[in-house]
Amino acid sequence: MCEIAKLIDRVGKIAKLVCEMVNELPLDDSRSERSPLLPDRHPEPDFFICDIFDAAPKSDTASMEHPLFTLSTKPDHQTREYRNGDKYIRLGPSPIGLATVHDRDILIYCISQCMARLNAGKQVLRTLRFNAHDLLKTTNRATNDRGYDLFKAALKRLQGTQIETNITTGGREQWEVFSFIESAKTIKETRDGRMQAIEITLSDWVFNAMHEKAGDILTISRDYFRLRKPLERRLYELARKMCGQSTKWHLRLETIHHRTGSNSTLKEFRRMLKAIIEDNRQHQHIPDYDFEMTDDLIIIRPRRDFTETYCEPETPRAIDQVKLKPSTIDVARKFAGGYDIYFLEGSWRDFLMRKQAIPENPDGSFVGFVKKYVEKNGRA
């Protein structure tokens, strides 16, 4: 009798499980469709600024032309190299793989924090301290135990991925080997041992690039953090960087294949890109832009609501190309009064942008600006 009772109980549990599964099925025979966007885990009605590619030197577009993050969602241990003429970037994986497109969210958050301080006229250092929960929430990541574990793994990849390059950043052209971040550590934990406050030190390369772009930041949609597929994120990045407020932009399939860093064959990449474009035509889940494929030509168009939302003027092209001599930086540093010289340069470029004017002697203008800034605001 005891065995029969156990058997009846087991059958009852199986029947209950089957009922639950049936209740989750759609009412008709069609398969339910999964949203192309990740769920909005932390709804907030605003936008976020700055990304690592837009933090590249103003005179250099190499960090947009060459993908720095792998599209793979599995550990990628392949060494990558991208060239453009005599410029190159070589990526070496960490023990747990290359830094991924999703890992890049951490850099977006860090640089956004730095830019907010720069815009407020505050000094910025390479080492940042902030609440880990705030970063996870802002970048639409889970805040449970698994979310924190994935966050730690992302930090390891960002620190462990080795980048070798001769590309100019922060006005300096030199051979360098570096990581995206120099270090990361927990400086405060919750009672249950979960990281609470964290300290991240950016690499010199990333920090210098950010300063060089201080006066020319692009705003990105918050829905960027909800895109499921790494390739969709790269398409958005490329569109946001290249299109600006142009009515449309053309790129050949081979060019996008190279710039996204896809490891697929061109035939497979065409198939994936076509599927994404068709999906975006139906759901418009990739923020701000529509894509069209005609043979091997990709057309990118900003949507009407995008041009209405992002109506801020772009940095004038002439101001964008103004360069200072290295000797000018050295002279200006003597009058900087303890302020970070690249913060002062960013403020000077903002000043030129507001005036919509280019000085005849940019080097003399910058040194004069530094003197007046310290005179007005006092020493740091």
Image (spheres, grey):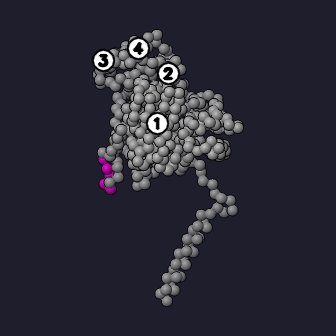
How much space separates mark 1 and mark 3, taking CA atoms?
A: 36 Å
Kind of residue sitting beneath label 4: Asp
Which residue appears at 55% of the width and 78% of the height? 11
Is residue 239 or residue 189 the one in the foreground?
239
Q: Whole-percent x and y of residue 128?
A: 35, 37
Kind of residue sitting beneath label 3: Lys
What residue sits right under mark 4 in the picture? 363
Give residue 90's mark: 1
Is residue 182 or residue 199 the one in the foreground?
182
Which residue appears at 39% of the width and 12% of the height? 364
What residue sits right under mark 2 in the picture? 320
What residue sits right under mark 3 in the picture? 334
Q: Secondary structure at mark 2?
A: helix
How much space separates mark 1 and mark 2, taking CA atoms?
A: 27 Å
Q: Are marks 1 and 2 in contact (CB under 8 Å)?
A: no
> Mark 1 or mark 4, which has the lower sequence index?
1
Magenta residues (range): 188-192
